């Protein structure tokens, strides 16, 4: 079996292009637009929704800058943003924010927990309340791809590579014994990572 030759410049360029495309697709998929969530779905903010509010919230992923839309009868109800202890006790006398126009939108401006209760204490005591967990913002830093012209072609000395596996020895047919060494995908990845200076 012939010794592996140097990795060609076109192979290296193609590999770097593929890695760059994968990194860009990962970063663009992680950036999403703010969403508007309709609290309670078709029922809205009511005393006895068809689905418990906290069960509804647990099925959603809330991000910073998303909004919650509360639709309710403003003659009988309102929405209060409260602290945890006021949520637990249904204390309607100390809201951080009150929404009472019947068609309210609340922007989730920070990560963490938000507590909402009905402004009608009886409704709150009967379960008209909601906890929303907003996911932390994760900033991914992706290095820009290196221009092809800045990467000189590199030759790999096969004697410095560690074999991934050894092929079985062939029967002696009168010629000198030889051992075939398989260089798998791992060698290419090691070269791209270490040899190209990406790690």
Image (tube, grey):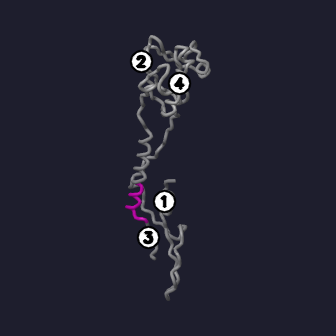
Closer to the chain start, of discs 2 and 1, is 2
Local crowd size for mark 3, using a 10 Å CA cut-off: few (<14), some (14–19), many (≥20): few
Label 1's element?
A: helix
Question: For this rendering, which residue is in front, 141 or 101?
Answer: 101
Q: Which mark is residue 130?
A: 4
Q: Is residue 144 above or below residue 83?
A: below
Residue beneath disc 2? 103
Label 3's element?
A: loop
Closer to the chain start, of discs 1 and 3, is 3
Q: Is residue 77 above or below residue 68?
A: above
Label 4's element?
A: strand
Local crowd size for mark 1, using a 10 Å CA cut-off: few (<14), some (14–19), many (≥20): few
Q: Position of residue 117 (x, y in %)?
A: 53, 19
Question: Which portion, as a residue range, is magenta?
Answer: 7-16
Label 2's element?
A: strand
Marks 2 and 1, how far apart in space?
Answer: 56 Å
Magenta: main secondary structure:
helix
Residue beneath disc 1? 189
Local crowd size for mark 4, using a 10 Å CA cut-off: few (<14), some (14–19), many (≥20): many
Q: Position of residue 115 (x, y in %)?
A: 55, 23
> Image quarter for residue 7?
bottom left
Q: Position of residue 52 (x, y in %)?
A: 51, 27
Residue lying at the far bottom of the rendered structure: 174
49 is within the stretch colored magenta: no
Closer to the chain start, of discs 1 and 4, is 4
Mark 4 and mark 2 in contact (Cβ < 8 Å)?
no
Marks 1 and 3, how far apart in space?
Answer: 16 Å
User: Measuring 62% from the left and 20% from the top, which residue is drawn there?
Assistant: 85
Residue beneath disc 3? 5
Marks 2 and 3, how far apart in space?
Answer: 70 Å
User: Measuring 43% from the left and 28% from the top, which residue is drawn there?
Assistant: 37
């Amino acid at each position: 079996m012939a010794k592996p030759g140097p990795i060609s410049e076109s192979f290296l360029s193609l590999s770097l292009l593929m890695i760059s495309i994968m990194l860009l697709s990962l970063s663009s998929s992680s950036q999403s637009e703010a969403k508007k969530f309709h609290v309670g779905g078709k029922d809205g903010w009511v005393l006895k929704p068809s689905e418990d509010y906290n069960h509804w919230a647990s099925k959603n992923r809330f991000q910073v800058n998303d909004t919650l839309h509360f639709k309710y009868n403003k003659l009988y109800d309102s929405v209060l943003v409260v602290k945890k202890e006021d949520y637990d006790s249904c204390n309607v006398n100390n809201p951080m924010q009150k929404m009472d126009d019947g068609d309210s939108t609340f922007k989730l401006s920070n990560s963490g927990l938000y507590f909402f209760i009905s402004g009608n204490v009886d409704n709150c005591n009967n379960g008209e309340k909601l906890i929303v967990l907003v996911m932390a913002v994760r900033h991914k830093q992706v290095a820009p791809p290196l221009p092809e012209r800045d990467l000189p072609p590199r030759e790999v000395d096969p004697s410095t590579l560690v074999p991934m596996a050894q092929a079985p020895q062939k029967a002696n047919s009168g010629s000198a014994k030889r051992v075939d060494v398989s260089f798998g995908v791992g060698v290419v990845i090691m070269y791209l990572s270490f040899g190209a200076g990406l790690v």
